[in-house]
Amino acid sequence: MRPKIFVVEGKNDASRLKQVYPDIQVFITNGSAIDPDHIEVLKALDETHDIVLFLDPDHAGERIRRILGRSLTHVFHAFIDQENAYSKNRKKIGIEHASTKTIKNALKDMRIIKQSSKSNVTHAFLYNMGLTGSKDSKKRRSRLAQTLKIGHTNGKTLYHRLRMFDISQEKIIEVLSESSS
């Protein structure tokens, strides 16, 4: 089993993770303007370690997740819901503000990218299921993403994550029917 490196955005995120798991190995990107040198270091680590992207559930975190997801091969994704990542005054969002339970659940539920996805999800399917193109789509996507633990998504990101994590139409139908009952 390969050792894991947990990638976070800032030193406060790293500190928070170390409060929960003192022996965890953490790599800090220093924000959304990820330095090309950091990418090279992570590529080198990727040869011997599994890389866990545990980034803030905001635009900057998603940007880093996209960049690193394309650059690395042994990548796991851990997500926390935006609602569980707000500071007490609700002005900031990040891993550093998450509860111990939220962090543990996110890391327990992390997902690995499937290199050869067999997902049968299509854009037409997402539209037909009301996950895109309708006034309730955002709410339905949010419920689905929360249940599947794939992070906050818009329509395009949902499509890519469902395929990336090899999630089938059948699983989506099952989740949606459970959440509507």
Image (cartoon, grey):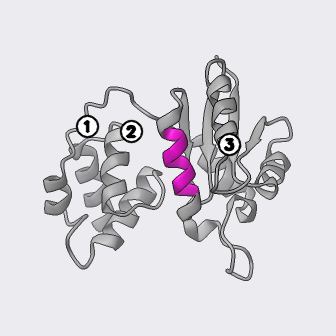
Q: Is residue 32 left or right of residue 23?
A: left
Q: Most extreme residue toward the front, as rendered?
A: 36
* Residue at left offset 52%, top offset 56%: 62
Q: Quadrant of the N terminus?
A: top right
Q: Residues within 10 Å of mark 2 (few under 14, many from 20)?
A: many
Amino acid tagged 2: Phe
Rounded to the nearest angstrom, the CA distance separating label 2 from label 3 is 19 Å
* Quadrant of the image occupied by residue 94: bottom right
Judging by the rendered image, the residue that carries numbered circle 1 is 119
Above/below status of 134 relative to 126: below
Rounded to the nearest angstrom, the CA distance separating label 2 from label 1 is 8 Å
Judging by the rendered image, the residue that carries numbered circle 3 is 7
* Residue at left offset 84%, top offset 35%: 23
Rounded to the nearest angstrom, the CA distance separating label 3 from label 1 is 27 Å
Judging by the rendered image, the residue that carries numbered circle 2 is 165
Q: Which residues are magenta?
A: 61-69
Amino acid tagged 1: Ser
Q: CB atoms at circles 2 and 1 under 8 Å apart?
A: yes
| Mark closest to the chain's N terminus, 2 or 1 | 1
* Quadrant of the image occupied by residue 12: bottom right
Q: Between residues 44 and 82, which one lies in front from this camera angle?
A: 44
Residue 25 magenta-highlighted? no
Secondary structure beneath dot 1 equals: loop
